[in-house]
Amino acid sequence: MVVVSSLKLQRPDVVIDWIVGDRFWDIVAQSGIAFRILRYERHGGIVSFFHLISEIRHCHYDYVFDMQGLARSGLMTFFAKSSHKIGRKDAREFSRLAYSRTVSHPGFGHAIDILKGFLDIVGCKTEVSGLVPELENIHSPSFETFLRREILPNQFICIFPESRRREKEWSFFLPLVKKISEQRKHTAILLMGSQPHCEYAISSPLCFDLFGKTSLSDTVFLIKNAQLVIANDSGPLHISAALGRNTLGLFTATDPVRFGPYPSHKNHNRVLCLKNLPHEVDSVTQVALEMLSR
């Protein structure tokens, strides 16, 4: 989304159709970044996929960008009507067969650095800020009410203990929550994620269990209003960085150079490389409190 936002900022004349998975459809729609949004239903079956292909073929495009580089996106690119089908040099699953050209990129670097090459294709500068201002358009009426009733004017932190893979999850969020709660008695803590996690609950009037209670647009809304976001290598970490919020990434298994909050040199983005040991709670707490005091 960072690269597409930069494209739209530099070339406001460009009309963008964007193929988006179910999970992300709502925030892309609210952001206003695309003219037309085509929904990819991951579990929709072959009939749903052929319907999507029919929608894609409804228009003739000046350029088709495959920024994913997998078999399904390669098929979409193959069936699209365009003389300029551009894909990633590191594309997999035979998707490169659909391209008329690939973009150059550094052999090793952040995922956003790899995608910046698409900007050069349409004459845009490849420097990006890492921010997605369109995410500021995301609203959540129910959580706007929640913040007014339960939290404001107190500050609050969003904490996301989950990640897509277990090995990427730091194991000591509970003692971290307790320490922050003890030292910042007037700062609310929102515990968030897709699944219920009763083990993280603590007895505090300003600690809220929101596990499994938020949509993606709710999550974006809460992140954009938070004073700090603490997360493993996960989607919420990158959303926070794209919104310019104070972002603390905890990395146990993946390389923050490639997968950390972007760009790493910005003052609001911090990363700690951890070994999943109990004594790390103190150092994580210290950095979190420093970021809150800015």
Image (cartoon, rainbow, N blue to C red):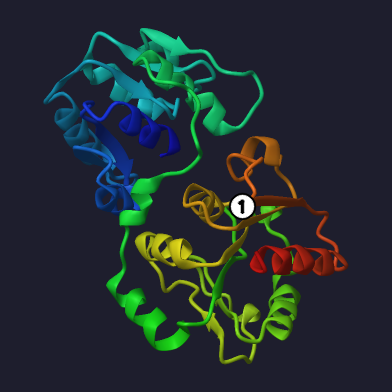
Q: Quadrant of residue 204?
A: bottom right
Q: Residue at x 32, y 58 (%)?
A: 138
Query: Residue 146's x, y, as percent?
Result: 38, 81
Q: Quadrant of residue 257?
A: top right
Q: Nearer the viewer, residue 292 or 80?
A: 292
In the rendered image of this protein, does residue 249 appear above or below residue 139?
Answer: above
Q: Residue at x 48, y 47 (%)?
A: 242
Q: Nearer the viewer, residue 219 or 8?
A: 8
Report whether 52 appears left or right of 25. Answer: left
Residue that label 1 marks: 268
Locate the N terminus and report the quarter of the image it occupies: top left
Q: Amino acid at mark 1?
A: His
Give the residue at the far right of this rendering. Answer: 279
In the rendered image of this protein, does residue 164 appear above or below residue 36?
Answer: below
In the rendered image of this protein, does residue 24 appear above or below residue 152?
Answer: above
Locate the C terminus and report the quarter of the image it occupies: bottom right
